[in-house]
C-alpha cells in the first residue's frame, strides 16, 4: 500500500480529502493544529502528527519511517484580509515553509506533489469564466504567496523532476454528506457559514458586502464548489501523477456563478427560516465575478463537479451545523 503525506490534513478541505484516501492508502497527516482540528481526522488508520513543516527533522523522520510516494499539500493560512496586514506570516508559512518539505522530498526521491492553489492567483479577472490561461496577477499577499509556490513548483519540475498538480480552488463550501466533518473556521469569514450562523442566532446578522456591482442583482458572483468534490479531485490528481501525467495547473469549480443574494435565498429555502441580513459597503479586494472554466480538469483528470447545485452544498453545511456539536469541533 502506497504512503501519502498530507500536510494540513486536519483543515477543512484537507480533512475531506483524507477521508477519501484513508481506505486505499497509508495516510499520514502533519498539521500544526493552529487552524486544523484533531477531531476532523475520523479514520483510525490515519496517523495525525502534530508539527510544523518548518521542522525539517520531523519531516525527515516521517519520510524515513513511511517512504512517502506523494505529498498532498494543504497547510496554509488563508485569510485574505490578514495577509494584507501580516504578509510576513503568509510568505513564511505559505511560500517559505514548503521549501523545506520540497528539499526533503528531493532527498528521499519523492516526486509527486499535489498543491492547494487558489483562484486568488488570478486577481481581478479580465474575462469569465476563467480558464488556466488567464493571466495570474494576484491582488493580495495570500494570492501572491500561493502563486509563488506554483512558480517554484514549475522550476522544481524542470530541475529535480518533481511532478506537481496545482489545483486552483474556487469557493469551497459544504460538508461531508454524512455530516461527520465540516467547516469550522475561527474566526469565520465565509458567506455560507455566516449566513447559516445568522439563521441559528450564532451571528447577529450577515452583512452583504456591496450591492452596486455590475452583476444582474448588484451582488458579487462566485463559483461555489462542494468540499467533497474538491477532495475527489486530489485523489484523481494522485492517480494522474501515478500514471505518469505531466505537471499541470487546473481550475476546480462548477462553471456556474451564484450571487450573494442567491446564496441568501437558497439558505432560506434549505433552513425554512429567514437569513437576518443588512446591506453594507463593498469589501476591499472583492472582484465582481469569479467563475471557473473547469474544462481542463475534466480533460486531464476526468474530474467534474458532482454537486452542481449550490443548494446541495448548503444542505450539507446545514446538516453538519444542526448536529449536536452545532457545526463545531471540540476545542
Ligand atoms: N460576502 C458577504 N458577506 C460576508 C462574507 C462574504 O457579502 O460576510 C461575500 C463576499 O463579498 C464574496 C462572497 O460573499 O463576494 C464570498 O465570500 P467568501 O468570504 O465566502 O469567499 P471568498 O470569495 O472571499 O473566497
Image (cartoon, rainbow, N blue to C red):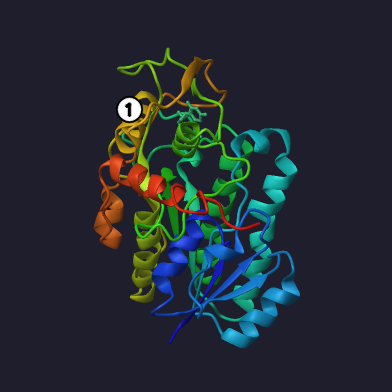
Viewer-proximal residue, 35 or 206?
Answer: 206
User: Which residue lies at the image location 62% right of the left edge and 69% below the top edge?
Assistant: 30
Quadrant in the picture for the C terminus: bottom right
Viewer-proximal residue, 131 or 196?
Answer: 196
Left or right side of 310 for 37: right
Label 1 near ligand 1 (CB < 8 Å): no
User: Which residue lies at the image location 43% right of the left edge and 80% below the top edge?
Assistant: 25
Q: x and y percent of residue 304 in the render?
A: 26, 54
Circle 1 SS class: helix
Left or right side of 158 for 55: right
Quarter where residue 273 is shown: top left
Residue 127 shows up from this direction: no
Q: x and y percent of residue 209 in the render?
A: 50, 21
Residue 250 shows up from this direction: yes
Find the residue positioned furthest to the top. Answer: 212
Tell how many labels. Answer: 1
Location of mark 1 (residue): 265
Left or right side of 49 for 312: left
User: Which residue lies at the image location 36% right of the left edge and 49% below the top edge?
Assistant: 316
Quadrant in the picture for the N terminus: bottom left
Quarter where residue 248 is shown: bottom left
Amino acid at each position: 500500500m502506497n504512503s501519502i503525506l498530507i500536510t494540513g490534513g486536519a483543515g477543512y478541505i484537507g480533512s475531506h480529502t483524507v477521508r477519501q484516501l484513508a481506505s486505499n492508502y497509508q495516510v499520514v497527516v502533519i498539521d500544526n493544529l493552529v487552524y486544523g482540528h484533531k477531531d476532523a481526522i475520523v479514520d483510525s488508520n490515519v496517523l495525525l502528527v502534530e508539527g510544523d513543516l518548518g521542522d525539517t527533522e520531523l519531516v525527515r523522520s516521517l519520510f524515513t519511517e513511511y517512504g512517502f510516494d506523494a505529498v498532498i499539500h494543504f497547510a496554509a493560512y488563508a485569510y485574505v484580509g490578514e495577509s494584507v496586514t501580516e504578509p510576513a506570516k503568509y510568505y513564511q508559512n505559505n511560500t517559505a515553509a514548503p521549501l523545506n518539505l520540497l528539499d526533503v522530498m528531493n532527498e528521499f526521491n519523492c516526486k509527486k506533489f499535489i498543491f492547494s492553489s487558489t483562484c486568488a492567483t488570478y486577481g481581478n479577472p479580465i474575462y469569465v469564466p476563467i480558464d488556466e490561461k488567464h493571466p495570474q496577477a494576484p491582488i493580495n499577499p495570500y494570492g501572491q504567496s500561493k502563486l509563488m509556490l506554483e512558480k517554484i513548483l514549475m522550476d522544481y519540475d524542470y530541475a529535480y523532476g518533481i511532478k506537481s498538480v496545482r489545483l486552483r480552488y474556487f469557493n469551497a463550501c459544504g460538508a461531508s454528506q454524512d455530516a461527520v466533518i465540516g467547516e469550522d473556521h475561527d474566526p469565520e469569514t465565509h458567506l455560507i457559514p455566516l449566513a447559516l450562523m445568522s439563521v441559528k442566532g450564532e451571528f447577529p446578522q450577515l452583512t452583504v458586502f456591496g450591492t452596486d456591482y455590475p452583476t444582474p442583482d448588484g451582488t458579487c458572483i462566485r463559483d461555489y464548489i462542494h468540499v467533497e468534490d474538491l477532495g475527489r479531485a486530489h485523489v484523481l490528481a494522485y492517480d494522474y501523477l501515478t500514471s505518469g501525467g505531466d505537471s499541470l495547473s487546473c481550475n476546480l469549480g462548477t462553471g456556474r456563478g451564484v450571487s450573494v443574494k442567491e446564496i441568501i435565498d437558497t439558505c432560506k429555502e434549505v433552513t425554512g427560516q429567514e437569513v437576518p441580513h443588512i446591506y453594507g459597503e463593498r469589501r476591499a479586494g472583492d472582484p465582481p465575478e469569479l467563475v471557473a472554466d473547469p474544462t481542463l480538469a475534466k480533460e486531464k483528470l476526468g474530474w467534474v463537479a458532482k454537486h452542481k447545485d449550490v443548494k446541495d452544498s448548503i444542505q450539507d453545511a446545514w446538516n453538519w451545523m444542526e448536529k449536536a456539536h452545532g457545526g463545531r469541533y471540540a476545542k
